[in-house]
Image (cartoon, helix red, strand yellow):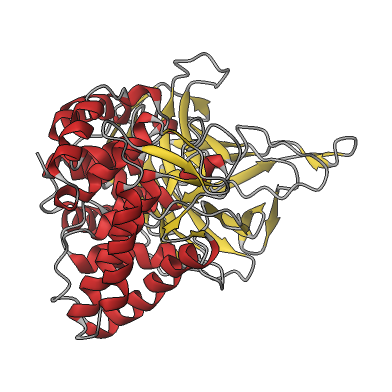
Amino acid sequence: MQLDLKKRPLGQYLSRHLLFEEWDPQGKGWAKGLYLALAQETTSMFASTVDRSAGFIRLEPTVNGAAAEYTVSADPSCAKIACAGGGNLTIALDGKALLIAGEGAGLILRVRLGSGENLRETERGKEIFMGATRYIIKPVVGSVKLEVTWQLTALRSSDPVLTFTPENGKLAIEIIDSNSAYEIPEYVHTPAEAAAKAEKAFAAFAAGLPDPLLAYDLWLGLQIRRGQRLVLGNPIRDQKAYALEQTFAALPMKDAAQRIRLLSALFALATPGGLVPAWAKESAIIPEAAPPVYGAALAGLDFSGVDKAELKTFRDAFAKVTEWWFRERSAGDACFYAYPHECGLAGKPAFPAPRPCVSPDLLSYLILCCSALAEIGKALGEDAACWTGREEKLTKALLSLWDGKAFLCRDALNGDTAPAPKLLACMPLLLGDKLPGEIRKALEAAAETVDPAEYDSLLPGLAALGCPALKAKLLAAGAERADAPSAAAFDPARSALLLALQERS
């Protein structure tokens, strides 16, 4: 499988290094060429904004010390650069180590840093200081020259330039992703070894998934954040992990244990009270609740084959984050969103006024959470009556929002009702057979008119899991976005959702 680095970067499972080609199709001022993206963890004390290109390194191959024309070919294991004047470079990843080796070619690295970041020489090599991260860059074979000056008026250094020169025609470079404690990961020391490991690891991950390219997006989208395996919204330019996207990443996984492990990483970010944050990054967790979509990723699973100790640990965390909604967002037998955008759709609030809202999508998500907790309880040989009872009460509350033609939202304070936004009103399709047939039929007809392009969200795809009429439309629209002509905009969570939809076709 070949990669077009203009559309998908070269990366690896749990690695933050990403290599891509920029050709600036939208005319935003990027110099065309090959780039290495690093984690953006700028901690500026003097500026409130960060240069959008900070954290990127432009790679310029050279032959005999001069810039050379080159071509790039790549697959999930490595990238190969062939210089027009002779000479070649190979780039591969082994976890947190990026390895470069070449013959007859040198390399110039032009580093872009943000406020509060710098690059300086230490006994370990050339070090990029980005927040708590330390990127260590060193030649193994060959030599390197650093060009950087301190700009007193700007209180920062100039963007560094590293020039690597081969020795006897050979060049080898290592770039290590470390931290402020200088914990150096174990890694192989040649691109050939790294490529072999990556090829084997990706083949195991993608086994059985219907689309290798989409599986690759998901594979490299999972990274370590706060000690957890989290899928990032956009690994190149956005180092945030979103709760919704973590749930979507679980959907194409083959068995209950795989999904449980991904959701366990999400629940590990919860506050002591059980609030699952809408998003998290390395340095912060936003105290804003994400809609409990995670129950949808557990619907219909067989938990009997999961290790009992692992399942119990997961159940305890799952129960805690579900209980949060009943404790903090309770309105009689229903639950509500505290503010309009808590539904997870930035441009489509659940209720037209800024008031607490009982919404059909939220009740559907919680019904699925209670149903999953009841099934897990049965697998553990425990009494599930508590969760079954809550599921029944939530179902009655949901059906009370049905006016005979469509679902409504209800003001949790005064009981006023208003039509639910079409997308949120279609979410009860997730319940499948739990919905009365006449309601399901009406929702499927309404879902056919939902335009996926109208929403910057993956929630329509979840509705499509229960609505065949919408599935083809979403697959077509999603595939077009997943194949967008910009490596810096690839979306692993959308790819995961498309994998889930394809498997259910």
Residue drawn at x 66%, y 40% as measured from the top left: 113
Residue 215 percent coordinates (x, y) = 23, 45
Q: Residue furthest right?
A: 153
Residue at left 42%, top 62%? 266
Whether residue 203 sits left or right of residue 297 in the image: it is left
Observer-nearest of 210 and 59: 210
**Image quadrant in which you'd find residue 446:** top left
Q: Is residue 117 above or below residue 392?
A: above
The residue lying toward the viewer, choosing from 261 and 428, is 428
Q: Is residue 14 left or right of residue 212?
A: right
Give the position of the N terminus as an image quadrant: top left
**Quarter of the view holding residue 233:** top left
Image: 30 above or below 246: above
At x 28%, y 85%, the residue is 309
Q: Is residue 18 left or right of residue 383?
A: right
- The spot of residue 122 in percent (x, y) is 68, 60
Q: Position of residue 306 (x, y in %)?
A: 19, 76
Classify the position of the C terminus by image quarter: top left
The answer to whether residue 388 is above or below residue 221 is below
Is residue 442 shown to the viewer in this render? yes
At x 39% / y 57%, what residue is drawn?
14
